[in-house]
Structures are given as structure tokens and as C-alpha cells.
């Protein structure tokens, strides 16, 4: 995997997305867990250097406000576990194939609830799901439930336990998965799943 310069991602998520999508410009993202506009952001580079449109969901109002002060794309101060994104997609004429879905809220149980709440009549080319397995507790259970859910919708896992806190998926209908098991050297932060 080629690491994309200027990315602020914590574990090379933007690089993974851009590699899978061949450095696509004018894409679309959904960011569940906006947190900070730039720090450890998995979408900042997509928006600022690749002209992606997107929406972020952040439950904490002041974080959403700060995010909106420095980003072009909106951050909605809503609960991603209950907010219905479908009317937003329809109203804003989003494509049925969305390029990137990030699911990263705390605790991991909330990430799972948010994932299960996503409109699955839309497709997501690349998905990063944070399960925080390193914390312990039931997080391995939430990781397994997310895995089963995404596989049941036709997604394929391509990186498991990235930095021991995240799994990465792709939609094999649009992403070439022939790299699995090939001679591509995996980034040191994760291993590819065959």
C-alpha cells in the first residue's frame, strides 16, 4: 500500500481508501464519529485535496460546531445510532454507491449500533469499522457481529485488526479483490486477510 502524503489518519485509513479507489477525486464519504476536523481525521485529505463531498455525524455539539468552522462539508450534531441518513442522502441526491464509510464512535458497542443503523440499500465501496478490540471486554463480540453483518451484505474483509482496533472492508462489486494473497507488501500497521 502506498502511503499518501499529508494524511492525518491515525492508521493510514485515507491511504487505504485512496489506494483502493485509485486516488479518486470528487468522491463521497460518510464519517460516523467526526471528532475533530483535522486531528486523526480519516476524511480531511479526501475533502481538501481530492474534493470529496461528505457528511460527518458527531454526537457532541461543540465538537460538531468546531468541525463546521473549519471544514467545507457538514458535520451534523446527531446520534449516529438513531439518526436516519436515508432522507439526507435522498434530499442531497447522493449516489447509490458511496465511496467511503467510516464507523468510529466510542464505545465499540455504539459503533456497532451505528453500523446497523446505516441505510444498506446504499452501497459503500470502502468501510473502516473501529471495534477497539485492544480494550477487551465485549469488543471482540462487537467486532464479530460487525463482520457477520457486513459479510451478509456482500462486503469482503481485507484487513483484520488494523493496529488492533479496526477492520477494513470493501465492496467486491466495485473494488478489485485480486490483491488478496498477492505479492503486495502489507503496511506494517495491519495484515491482509486471505
Image: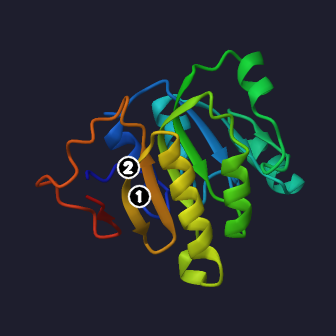
Task: Determine the secondary structure under disc 1.
Answer: loop
- How packed is label 1: few (under 14 Cα within 10 Å), some, or many (20 or more)? many
- How packed is label 2: few (under 14 Cα within 10 Å), some, or many (20 or more)? many
Disc number at residue 184?
none
Residue at figure coordinates x 76%, y 33% from the top left: 85
Q: Is residue 145 left or right of residue 7?
A: right
Q: Give the quarter of the figure containing the C terminus.
A: bottom left
Looking at the image, the residue that sits furthest to the right is: 61
Location of residue 7 in the rendering, given as x and y in whole percent from the top left corner: 45, 52
Colour mapping used in the image = rainbow
Q: To which quarter of the image does residue 95 belong?
A: top right
Can the viewer see residue 66?
yes
Location of residue 2 in the rendering, given as x and y in whole percent from the top left corner: 26, 51
Residue at figure coordinates x 62%, y 28% from the top left: 121
Q: Foreground: 50 or 80?
A: 80
Location of residue 100 in the rendering, given as x and y in whole percent from the top left corner: 52, 39
61 versus 45 height, above or below? below
Q: Is residue 184 left or right of residue 2?
A: left
Task: Determine the secondary structure under disc 2.
Answer: helix
Residue at figure coordinates x 68%, y 33% from the top left: 72
- Residue annotated with mark 1: 12
Looking at the image, the residue that sits furthest to the left is: 183
Location of residue 124 in the rendering, given as x and y in whole percent from the top left corner: 52, 35
Q: Is residue 8 left or right of residue 2?
A: right
- Residue annotated with mark 2: 15
Residue at figure coordinates x 32%, y 42% from the top left: 19
Cα separation between marks 2 and 1: 5 Å
Q: Are marks 2 and 1 in contact (CB under 8 Å)?
A: yes
Q: Is residue 126 left or right of residue 177?
A: right
Amino acid at each position: 500500500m502506498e502511503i499518501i502524503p499529508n494524511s492525518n489518519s491515525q492508521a493510514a485509513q485515507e491511504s487505504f481508501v485512496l489506494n483502493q479507489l485509485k486516488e479518486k477525486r470528487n468522491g463521497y464519504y460518510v464519517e460516523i464519529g467526526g471528532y475533530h476536523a483535522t486531528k486523526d481525521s480519516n476524511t480531511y485529505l479526501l475533502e481538501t485535496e481530492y474534493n470529496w463531498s461528505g457528511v460527518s455525524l458527531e454526537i457532541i455539539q461543540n465538537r460538531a460546531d468546531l468541525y463546521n468552522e473549519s471544514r467545507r462539508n457538514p458535520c451534523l450534531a446527531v446520534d449516529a445510532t438513531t439518526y436516519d441518513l436515508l432522507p439526507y442522502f435522498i434530499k442531497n441526491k447522493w449516489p447509490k454507491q458511496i465511496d467511503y464509510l467510516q464507523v468510529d464512535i466510542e464505545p465499540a458497542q455504539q459503533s456497532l449500533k451505528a453500523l446497523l443503523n446505516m441505510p444498506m440499500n446504499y452501497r459503500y465501496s470502502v468501510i473502516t469499522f473501529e471495534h477497539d478490540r485492544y480494550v477487551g471486554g465485549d469488543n471482540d463480540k462487537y467486532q464479530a457481529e460487525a463482520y457477520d453483518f457486513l459479510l451478509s451484505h456482500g462486503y469482503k474483509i481485507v484487513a483484520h485488526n488494523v493496529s488492533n482496533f479496526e477492520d477494513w472492508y470493501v465492496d467486491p462489486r466495485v473494488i478489485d479483490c485480486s490483491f488478496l494473497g498477492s505479492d503486495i507488501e502489507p503496511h506494517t500497521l495491519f495484515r491482509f486477510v486471505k
